[in-house]
Each structure stands twice: as structure tokens, then as C-alpha cells.
Image (cartoon, rainbow, N blue to C red):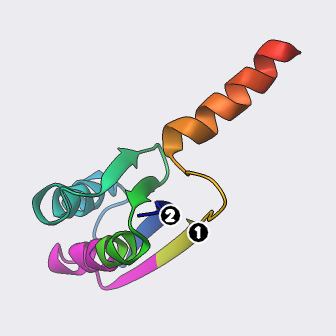
Amino acid sequence: MPKAMIDVAIVPVGTSATSISGFVAACEQVLREEFPDVTARLNPMTTTLEGDLDRIIAAARRMHEAPFLEGASRVSTTIRIDDRRDAELTMQGKLMAVQEKLAVR
């Protein structure tokens, strides 16, 4: 089954504090508990998900709900999809392709 990748940024709005790390942790917990089949990488400003397109979109949808359950009044979510059908697509493969090109220079 071909893998796809999405980058998801979930921003709670209308919270009582400026820090959002607790909301991020709640989103990451959703991944651990409900989507063990999805490969996830937490980045400083987003989370990248890799797997079956339907599953990773479902995971992003559930992650979007997590801040509401933690008390946010509003949530803004941005999703970017990378879905390549002519070759295998993985997070590691994308990074290695750039690193190989840097080594040549």
C-alpha cells in the first residue's frame, strides 16, 4: 500500500495562557493511543504523519479535536499533504535525498 505524508499544525486559540505545549501533548497522546499504525514525528512547530492517506487524515482530524477537550475555545489547523504515487514516500527517504545532494556539493 502506498504511503502518504501530511504535515499538520494545530493551534489552539482562546486559551488562558500563551504556552500551548499542553495542547500539543494532548494531540500527540491521541496519536499514541489511537493510531499506533501511523508513523509520527513531532517537530518544533508541526507534526509529520506518514502512512495510509485515509488513516493519517483520520489521525489529523482526531488531533484537531484534542485541544477542544483540553479547554480551547477555538482551534486553527493547517494540513499539507504529500502523496507520491510513482515512488515510495517516507520521511527518512526525503531527508536522505537532500543529504545526498548536500554531500555532492
In-image side of 63 versus 104 (left or right): left
In-image side of 22 versus 14 (left or right): left
Q: Which residue is mark 2?
A: 6
Q: Which residue is located at x 62 percent, y 65 percent? A: 85
Q: Which mark is residue 80?
A: 1
Pointers 1 and 2 in contact (C-beta within 8 Å): yes
**Residue 40 or residue 68, whichever sits in front:** 40
Q: Earlier in the sequence, mark 1 or mark 2?
A: 2
Q: Residues within 10 Å of mark 2 (few under 14, many from 20)?
A: many
In-image side of 10 versus 68 (left or right): right
Q: CA distance from mark 1 to mark 2?
A: 5 Å
The kind of residue on which mark 1 rests is Arg
Q: Which residues are magenta?
A: 61-76
The kind of residue on which mark 2 rests is Ile
On screen, residue 49 above or below 95: below
In-image side of 84 versus 69 (left or right): right
Figure quadrant of the N terminus: bottom left
**Residue 63 or residue 20, whichever sits in front:** 63
**Residue 12 or residue 85, whichever sits in front:** 85
